[in-house]
Amino acid sequence: MVSSVKGTQDIRYPEIKRWQRVEATAREVFARYGFTEIRTPILERTELFVRGIGSETDIVNKEMYTFKDRKGRSLTLRPENTAGVARAVVEHSLHRSPSHARLFYIGPQFRYERPQKGRYRQFHQVGAEVIGDSSPGVDAETIAMVVDFLSQLGVMGLSVQVNSVGCPECRPGFVRVLKEALEEKKEFLCPDCNNRLERNPLRVFDCKVPSCREILKEAPVINENLCDDCRVHHEAVRKILGLMNVEAVQNPRLVRGLDYYTRTVFEITSAVLGAQDAIVGGGRYDGLLEEIGGPAVPAFGWALGIERLIMVLPDDASEEGRRLYLAWNGEDAYDAAVELACELRKRDCHVVMEHSARSFKSALKRADKLDSKWTVLLGEDELSSGLVTLKEMSTGEQSSLKWPELFSLMESEGEK
Ligand code: AMP
């Protein structure tokens, strides 16, 4: 047997219903905020990610699925979608059109990571990007939108954390201060942190090693070293979040793994998820479009991992639907059942009818396995009396109904 690729998953019934609910709710909620969908290619030129994500990041260094095509060009399966959206914006000058200023996407991403619960090599993200506005209100509203989305889905126990990572004016000074402070403790930091200290010091804050975390508790934090503009921006973001009733905790040690972030960064975590507890990550990336060869246009965005969201998603009874299994017995009953199934589907019922003959006993077993709410039995007796037998599966109660009675019952169930 040829098995699936490590770190990938087949998303099947019944879990697929949760995915569909997530996607439908995303479309509904984001439309309320004036966002339109964009679908960018899964394949992009490798250079886009090297420039857009940064050559010193884990993603670009060790996690990309990169290969040469038949003409020897280096291509990569997208590890995230922001760079692709930014490329599309630049390529089609979307930043000039107000109808493209607010974009969202839903789709698969690929990273060669060590698979574990909540971490896969093919995973899926919902994300949103606002292009062309550097106002703090954009940061706050886009964070509020994802909080609104999660609360529409009934997800509980989330924590929203915000921070500012400064801008090209104030960050280099802070990085110097941080580096100096940590150089003194170098021998107590893990090899990864030593590496980060050389290449990308801010990323030491991503370290999960307990002894490093202890040291970092004492390290200088960026939000005490912001320039005036960044400080004013950050205070405004927090104030507007308050106006929007979004409870956000200031986390001075929150940084993001990607180089292109400026000012606001935020994360939404779930207390029930364990090690991979981040559901949403995002922030402002005013330098990205320029980095990939476009104009200097500011932007704000976030990405949410659907697999992790599905793990904390509560059940929704409305997903049950009006599921009905239609069992028949005898050739004439088969013809009538075909017609009855058509009529029921016209009335929005979900009807499973099988086309090979089986006894009512075996049909009822299958109806049970299919989690049907009802079974309709149509045999010779029913046919001659013009009735059907309706069995409610949870109670076992049976009744005889005329076809129009069955239709009105199903219609009234649909209105519930
Ligand atoms: P990032 O693009 O790294 O900022 O990640 C944004 C969100 O995508 C995270 O908060 C996770 O929910 C999700 N995510 C990132 N990497 C993975 C992965 N390998 N498997 C599953 N979800 C992921």
Image (spheres, rainbow, N blue to C red):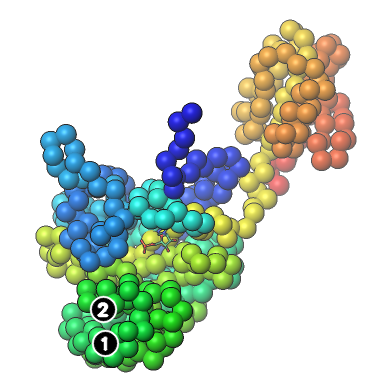
In the image, residue 377 above or below residue 385: below
Q: What's the residue at 38%, 55% (across, down)?
A: 113
Horizontal arrangement in the rendering, residue 174 relative to residue 118 (left or right): left
Q: Which mark is residue 133?
A: none
- Can you identify the residue that label 2 sits on? 197
Q: What's the residue at 43%, 45% (across, down)?
A: 6
Contact flag, marks 2 and 1 (Cβ < 8 Å): yes
In the image, residue 396 above or below residue 383: below
**Picture coordinates of residue 33 (x, y %)?**
40, 62
Q: Amino acid at mark 1?
A: Glu
Q: Earlier in the sequence, mark 2 or mark 1?
A: 1
**Picture coordinates of residue 85 (x, y %)?**
26, 55
Q: Secondary structure at mark 1?
A: helix
Who is closer to the viewer here, 108 or 404?
108
**Picture coordinates of residue 80 (x, y %)?**
32, 56
Give the alpha-carbon distance from disc 2 to disc 1, as whole Å: 8 Å
Q: Is residue 100 visible?
A: no
